[in-house]
Image (spheres, rainbow, N blue to C red):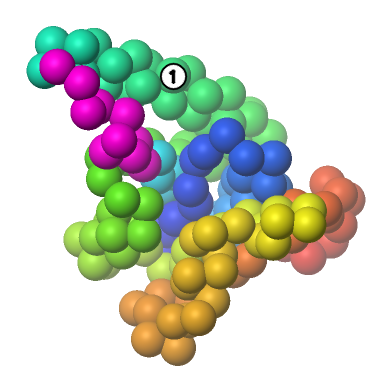
């Protein structure tokens, strides 16, 4: 089954990327894999403190994921899968794509503010021609109705 890989973070545009991935999966018989990446700098403390912080970060991610997962299951009939990785965002994202041959499309949300679309969208857009899967960039400013119309 082809899976849509979408990143889970605290950005506003993440919501639209999640919606798009779930709607496309529902309409095409695909699946959704949600990837959350914990940056390494969060754990540069003493080992015991770092372990506690790592566990807390994972718990926050799982709670955040469950909100999206419930919506995907209830509204779209899609049961997403959560993957949590630790490291630099771009390296971990690419590793996940290489390690999971069922990933068919990477879905990223693009910020609509003055700061640009976001660091991952910017980085990946520059190398889009060499990526192993296509990228769908979902504008953060699209309405729910617009998302429904294009999926």
The residue drawn where x is 52% and y is 24% is: 64
Residue 132 sits above or below residue 43 on the image:
below
Q: Residue 36 location in percent, x, y?
A: 40, 40
The residue drawn where x is 27% and y is 38% is: 40
Most foreground residue, 95 or 28: 95
Locate the C terminus and report the quarter of the image it occupies: bottom right
The residue drawn where x is 44% and y is 55% is: 5
State the image quarter where residue 18 is shown: top right
Q: How many marks?
A: 1
Most extreme residue toward the bottom is: 129
Does the magenta portion include 128? no
As helix, strand or loop, the secondary structure at mark 1 comes to helix
Q: Residue 143 location in percent, x, y?
A: 86, 49
Q: Residue 19 location in percent, x, y?
A: 67, 46
For residue 21, side relative to residue 146 (left or right):
left
Magenta stretch? Answer: 37-46
For residue 86, side relative to residue 117 (left or right):
left
- Judging by the rendered image, the residue that carries numbered circle 1 is 60
Locate the N terminus and report the quarter of the image it occupies: bottom left
Residue 28 sits above or below residue 6 on the image:
below
Most foreground residue, 147 or 139: 139
State the image quarter where residue 108 is shown: bottom right
Residue 121 sits above or below residue 72 on the image:
below
Most extreme residue toward the front is: 45
State the image quarter where residue 148 is shown: bottom right
Most extreme residue toward the left is: 47
Q: Residue 91 location in percent, x, y?
A: 28, 59
User: Can residue 82 be seen from the camera position used here?
Assistant: yes
């Amino acid at each position: 089954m082809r899976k849509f890989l979408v990143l889970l973070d605290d950005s506003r545009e993440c919501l639209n990327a999640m919606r798009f991935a779930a709607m496309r999966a529902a309409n095409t018989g695909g699946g959704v894999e949600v990837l959350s990446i914990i940056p390494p700098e969060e754990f540069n403390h003493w080992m015991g403190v770092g372990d506690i912080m790592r566990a807390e970060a994972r718990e926050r991610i799982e709670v955040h994921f469950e909100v999206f997962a419930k919506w995907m299951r209830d509204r779209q009939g899609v049961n997403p899968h959560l993957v949590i990785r630790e490291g630099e965002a771009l390296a971990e994202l690419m590793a996940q794509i290489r390690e999971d041959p069922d990933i068919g499309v990477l879905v990223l949300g693009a910020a609509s503010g003055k700061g640009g679309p976001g660091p991952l969208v910017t980085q990946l857009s520059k190398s889009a021609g060499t990526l192993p899967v296509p990228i769908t960039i979902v504008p953060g400013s699209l309405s729910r109705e617009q998302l429904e119309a294009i999926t």
